[in-house]
Amino acid sequence: MITIEFQFTSDEDLKGSYTTYKRKITLGHSSRCDLPIEDSQLIDEHLVLQTSKEGLICSSIGQGKYLVNGKSIVGTLLLKKGDQVSLGSSSFNIVDFQDVEVENTSEFMKDKYKELVTSEPDLADVFDVIKFELIEAERSKDV
């Protein structure tokens, strides 16, 4: 799990907090990235964030350069909570991270569902629609 919060960005869609339960995410200019950033200063795949037992690893991809707490970095660095990462015209803080290994994915997803629906009751309707669409897609595949 990785949570970052964008402080500054030219990409309006990114402002605020972003949480993923992936252990590894890519950031860059390309739509192939887990977190694409509309910024011409970035290369297609600019940066990787990856959880590990040691902490949160930040690695540049190719010629991608970035700053951590104002210091220029090329390559790999171990981050900690509160670190500020800047790439191109965007800047985000490391809010939280955990190297989560989920043994029972269905139980994990049920817990996350309950947590989300409790905090945002309107999401229950959205999840119901998604569930219905998935069931219908599965049925049409079997025909």
Image: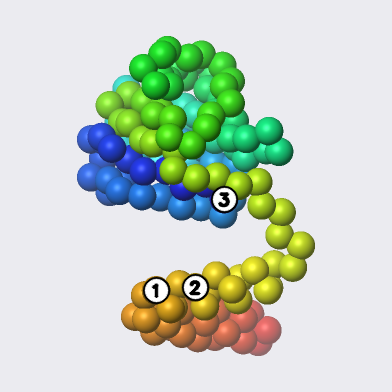
Residue position marked by numbered label 2 in the rendering: 115
Relative to residue 10, is residue 4 drawn left or right?
A: right
Residue position marked by numbered label 3 in the rendering: 1
Visible in this render: residue 74?
yes
| Other-residue count near label 3 (Cα within 10 Å), few / some / many at <14 / 14–19 / ≥20 | some
Name the image quarter holding the C terminus.
bottom right
Does label 3 or label 2 sit earlier along the sequence? 3
Going by the numbered disc 3, the residue's amino acid type is: Met
Q: Residue 137: horizontal and vertical position, in percent?
A: 56, 80
Name the residue: 47% across, 27% down.
Answer: 46
Asked whether the beta carbons under mark 1 and mark 2 sit within 8 Å of each other, the answer is yes
Task: Give the secondary structure at mark 2.
Answer: helix
Relative to residue 41, is residue 116 drawn left or right?
A: right
Distance from Cα at disc 1 to Cα at disc 3: 19 Å
Going by the numbered disc 1, the residue's amino acid type is: Ser
Task: Give the secondary structure at mark 1.
Answer: helix
Visible in this render: residue 29?
no
The label number, if any, that marks residue 119 in the structure image:
1
Distance from Cα at disc 1 to Cα at disc 2: 6 Å
Q: Is residue 116 above or below residue 89?
A: below
Does label 1 or label 3 sit earlier along the sequence? 3
Asked whether the beta carbons under mark 3 and mark 2 sit within 8 Å of each other, the answer is no
Question: Which of the pair 117/39 is nearer the observer?
Answer: 117
Distance from Cα at disc 3 to Cα at disc 2: 15 Å
Going by the numbered disc 2, the residue's amino acid type is: Glu
Q: Residue 59: horizontal and vertical position, in percent?
A: 56, 25
Q: Residue 129: horizontal and vertical position, in percent?
A: 43, 83
